[in-house]
Image (cartoon, rainbow, N blue to C red):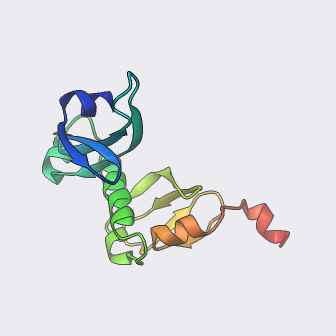
Amino acid sequence: MSEAIKRGQIRWNSSDGWRFSFVEDGIRFTVVVGDTETPSPVVVTGWTEVESWPAALSSPRWTENDVHTIQLRSDLSAHRDEQIPSLIRPRTVDRPFEVGNHRITTEAGAGCVECNDCGRRFRSKAELCGRRCREPADLTSM
């Protein structure tokens, strides 16, 4: 976050604060900062996006799994209320990341993400955020 604030291009967004954005090794880092009038500005949110697949994949900083994870997160957020199996299908994400209290992964060819904890499958961010994660043992007590 500090690198994005120090080195990023700054833009004002009236809805959520100042946006700082920069690209390194094929990945765009964006951080939104509010309350910039104080000695300790408040980071509101931040995210990453794949700016250049070739640059990201050739960088020693990112693994192929990292780049797929960043792209999958971006696709889920950009199409929050839509089912996006065609955008999930090309991704291979074997290290779980959290969305809506679900720790998800996916395999190339699968049109959904799967929660490693409850085993449910999802095709949109709205579905992920709309259902609580329960351990498989919890499902039998329903």
- Can you name the residue that lies furthest to the right here? 141
Let me know if residue 27 appears in the view. Answer: yes
* Nearer the observer, 22 or 16: 16
* Nearer the observer, 47 or 12: 12
- The residue shown at (28%, 42%) is 18
**Is 1 placed left or right of 125 in the picture?**
left
Let me know if residue 24 appears in the view. Answer: no
- The residue shown at (46%, 74%) is 123
For residue 85, above or below residue 18: below
x, y percent for residue 38 = 38, 26
For residue 141, above or below residue 99: below
**Is 93 placed left or right of 78 in the picture?**
right
Quadrant location of the N terminus? top left
x, y percent for residue 53 = 18, 53
- The residue shown at (85%, 69%) is 141
**Is 8 placed left or right of 83 in the picture?**
left
**Is 12 placed left or right of 133 in the picture?**
left
Q: Looking at the rendering, which quadrant does residue 68 occupy?
A: bottom left
- Can you name the residue that lies furthest to the top here? 39
- The residue shown at (42%, 78%) is 83
Quadrant location of the C terminus? bottom right
x, y percent for residue 101 = 59, 55
x, y percent for residue 115 = 57, 61
* Nearer the observer, 94 or 28: 28
For residue 27, above or below residue 87: above
